[in-house]
Image (cartoon, grey):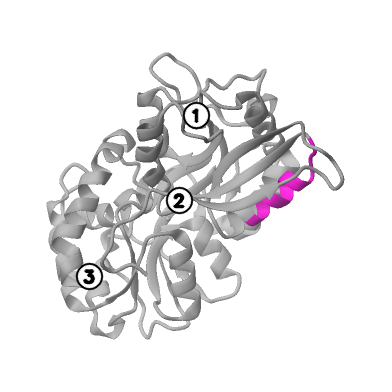
Amino acid sequence: MFATSRRDFLKGAASAAAMGTGVSPGGAGARAAETITAVEWGGNYIDTMKKIAASQSDVAINWQLHAGGSIAILPKIKATWPKHGIDLLTGWDVSWQTIAKEGWAAPVTVEQVPNISDVPQKLLVKDSAGNVINIPRTISALYWWYREDLVPFEITKLEDLLDPRLKGKICWPVPSLNSNLQAVSFALHKGGNERNMEPAWDFLKQLARSGNIGRVAIADTDTTTSITSGETWVTFSAGTAANRIGQNFKLKYLSKAPSQSGFKTFVFHEGWCVLKEGRTDAAFKFANFALRPENNEHFNRSIGGVPVNAKAKPSDDVRHMSFNNEEMERYVYIPDWAYISQEVNAWNKRWEREIQPLL
């Protein structure tokens, strides 16, 4: 069994800046030996990680938030290297491709992160020198889903997104969120793929002209706010977000929709990367602490993800994101992450040029 669970703008582009969220000290009354700067996603991600950080006293953390998708911060790091000011960075498959290429990551070893020995080896990403660069913490997926309690009909195929009954009710992520896999799903359904996106842009133009896109999200929190408020009903996002919302609302997950529907699921994993030129020892120490079985289980239960530590128990709530080998073939598409990481900036510009004016 392969189990899998990672992002009110209509006219602007995603910002690459990060927003400060304060410092988490170690355990109550304790004085941390060293302070690191960590970049995290918002919502339950940072709330839960702050609680985990507060249960230890070795490392204090200056928390920063991703602004936009996790790849939006990468140009900032490149522009300021080696004085980037970040010790611990959250990211996912696409992020690792760029980080590995640029040589920014401090190599991860079992000596520095002992708990990584309990993580599946296939989740470890290596650079050209063979060094592991990531510290996984969550297995997740990206897929389409909707508020079943609000949508007045059953959505069975991608073409249903053009239905007039969904006027203003689709929340569409900008290309920097989810690395534009929402559009890649269009391409796959229309005969293309991540390397042939023309079918996707054609269909996306139809969708934009239909008036059914009522909100454009530049961050995961935009999606959550729009869907939970009832402003929009249909979206594409990481399963962690859908899982959390599904605890309070009746959702229809399209993670295992028939192949002819066009609703593909994209499997990925999230985690940490310790950047060079910073407080690497302290960053590794905290990452290892967060990867302990009890902490990894607590974190993933809170965000709706699947833990990577083999000694941690996954929640029953992620069954709709669990795939056996046959289901992996039927429902899941694994894109060329390296290629996607090179194309996202161009896709953002094309979105601004060709789609945004139609909204």
Q: Which residue matches tag 2?
A: 141
**Residue 159 tag number:** 3
Kindly identify the residue that appears in the image at 85 percent across and 48 percent down. 28
- The residue at the far top in this view is 129
Rendering quarter of residue 92: top left
Q: Which secondary structure lies at badge 1?
A: helix
Q: Earlier in the sequence, mark 2 or mark 3?
A: 2
Camera-nearest residue between 244 and 327: 244
Kindly identify the residue that appears in the image at 41 percent across and 35 percent down. 77
Query: How far across and how far down the image is residue 322, in percent?
Result: 52, 51
The prevailing secondary structure element of the residues shown in magenta is helix
Q: Quadrant of the C terminus?
A: bottom left
Q: CA distance from mark 2 to mark 3?
A: 22 Å
Query: How far across and how far down the image is residue 357, in percent?
Result: 16, 68
Q: Which secondary structure lies at badge 3?
A: helix
Q: Are marks 2 and 1 in contact (CB under 8 Å)?
A: no
Q: Give the extent of the magenta segment.
A: 47-57
Q: Which residue matches tag 1?
A: 122
Q: Earlier in the sequence, mark 3 or mark 1?
A: 1
Q: Residues within 10 Å of mark 1 (few under 14, many from 20)?
A: few
- Location of residue 347 with respect to 310 vertically, above or below: below
